[in-house]
Image: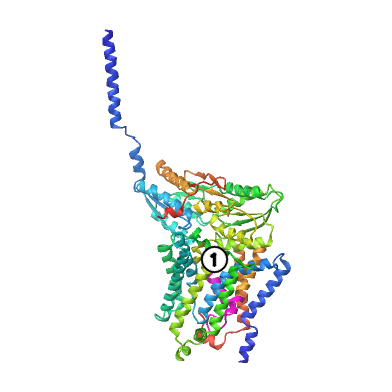
Amino acid sequence: MFGRIKSALVSQERIVLVTAVILFCVFSLFLKGFLSAANLLTLVRSVSVLGVLGVAMAIVVIGRGVDLAIVATYAMSAAWTLRLATQGVAIGPALLLGLALAVAVGLINGLLIAFAEIPALFATLGMAAFVYGFVRFALVPLVVVYMPANAASISWIGGGFVAGVPTPILLFALVAFLGHAFLAFTKAGRFIYAMGDNFAAARNSGAPVRGLIVLQYALSAAIAYVAGIITATAVSSVNTNVVNSSLIYDVILVVVLGGIGLSGGRGGIRNVLVGTLLIGILLNGMTIMNIQYTLQNVIRSLILLSAIVLDSLVNPRDEQTEQQGDI
Amino acid sequence: MRMGRIAATLGLALSLTGAAAYATAAGIDDPRRADYFKDFAGKTIAFVPVTMGIDLTEGWAAVMKQQADRLHMKLEIRDPHFSADAGAQAITSLISEKPDVLVVHNPDVNSYARLLKRAEAAGIHVIQINMRSNYNSDVYVGADWIGIGEAEANAVLEKCGPGTSQKVAILQGQPTSGSDSGMMKGADNVFSKHPEIKVVANLAGEWDATKAQSIISTVIQQNPDLCGVVGFWDVMDLGAAAAIKQSGKPIVLVTSGGGEQMACDNVAKGVFYKEIAYQVMNQGRDINDMIATVLETGLPAGKLKAVIYSPQLVISKESLHPGLCWSAAALKK
């Protein structure tokens, strides 16, 4: 018990938070314009989609799963929505159909994992490839889909402001709040923690584990769709090639970096916020310093690696993780 | 006697006219025609784009397909889907399959250079399209990137003269690509003659609108008085346009691209001040002509060394008219 408390003081979340604060202070001191309110809004806006995807991933990871199909769902369901609108479908039905596609993907993921008992890693990896391939083949023939004129009524989602704050930030805050409320205060949310902590014990004590797994993946897919629509409306297009980018690793990164262990049962939405902010501060600072994108990747991965190494030094793996193993 | 002469002349004239009339009725055969069709029938054209599914490659492929169908040639498309590795594998296997012509769209100047040399050594004609490699093969068909870079820089200069901040940001795609290195050189050519222009940022958005948005919005925060952005590809520059729109500032955005309908729409809306375009349909026609040339001349692979730069089309509010742009969506139907 005391060990837990002591470890919490130097938890990974703390380490990452401290790293973020240090970077923030250094950038504020040395980079002109970094600390301005407008730049801080830009900073958070540039990572708010990543944060929303992080919330979706966190809900799954806390239940000891992983959803590698999240980015495919995010891009392809939003792309299909824009494609439908381009073909003349009114924007309302187009949005609903896109959401239905995303939720269907999540449900299939959940069913495969809960009932066919396929490991989440393989089920969602396969699903990611299938969703991308199927949508490109049957629904969206082009790599980049533009937002048509008849979809202009939803452009506020990614491009609007409320009281000077960009809407993506507000949506990120809303999704984070709802995600937190779900995990912390609902019965299903508490069961997800129980499931992640000890699956067998949760099942034996009567938690409806199969249903919960399906719910988790359906939720993560639906949240991914929200992120997709934010991106689509923010840049007036969807680049489906993002499925083949490193975005999925970034999503896992903000979750793990913030301190939600891949072994499940620990952490919360707060950890996602911390991880997302660190990435945001890094990206923003490096762009201000005019560092080339490829070098940015190197610096980012080095800082992330050192945060993880530091964590494993101050928090040696305990008996429980040793037995359960990571993903 | 005199009457006899007249009659003879008349008779000759009549018979000539008759012969001519006969010839007209039968038509004259073009001796080269049969050979022309024989030169092409059964030939194989292989196309390795950076990816299918973008306006440029879909456009070229559609035009190539028309000619291949008309002349009974086979068009094979190997889609490496943005992966240089997959593209290199496709070319390697094509070298052993020996198509007659290999049309390549290079992801950068190095990845395929050696392979293209090997392909020509194996007797395959190599046509490089729009993005060249370091190896100069039979033909390069594509944009004159240095010229486009210069035109883009000049277009920004029009709006960022004295009285403005004269601060400009450059948004590259992928610095190692054949297109970016050229456009960068072109922009340098112009800006080096205008020391009053301050290039406050020069970053790469990896051809992705989302990255472009986050980069340009940060650049605008740092330089609230930014005057112009030189973007290297319209599809990516939509992200820069979103960042500019969200900043609410009158920042000039100049871009380049394939002159697809999206470009005309955005110029009409004032999102792009100008697009310096290479017309994809005409480039497709150029590729077709060069395919025909290498096959007809019978030159061994690697001998021709021709370059065809696509004429620049400046899409601006002034030049805009219906039909100026082409539609990728229409190709798909």
Residue range of the region highlighted in magenta in the rendering: A246-273
Q: In the picture, which quadrant includes the C terminus of chain B? A: bottom left
Vertical order, B121 against A58 (above or below): above
**Which chain does tag 1 point to?**
A
Vertical order, B272 against A244 (above or below): above
- Residue A200: percent from the left, percent from the top? 46, 88
Identity of the residue drawn at 28% across and 25% down: B19
Task: Determine if residue B263 is in view.
Answer: yes
The amino acid marked with disc number 1 is Thr
Q: Quadrant of residue B206?
A: bottom right
Residue A3 vs residue A153: left or right? right
Q: Is residue B247 magenta?
A: no
Q: Which residue is mark 1?
A: A231
Identity of the residue drawn at 41% across and 78% down: A111
Q: Hey, which residue is sitting farthest right in the picture?
A: A29
Vertical order, A205 against A314 (above or below): below
Identity of the residue drawn at 52% across and 45% down: B309
Q: In the picture, which quadrant includes the N terminus of chain B? A: top left
Instruction: Pick whichever, A126 or A37, lies toward us.
Output: A37
Instruction: Pick whichever, A315 or A273, lies toward us.
Output: A273
- Residue A15: percent from the left, percent from the top? 64, 79
> Badge 1: how crowded within 10 Å, few (<14), some, or many (20+)?
many
Q: What secondary structure is marked by label 1? A: helix
Q: Hey, which residue is sitting farthest top in the picture?
A: B1
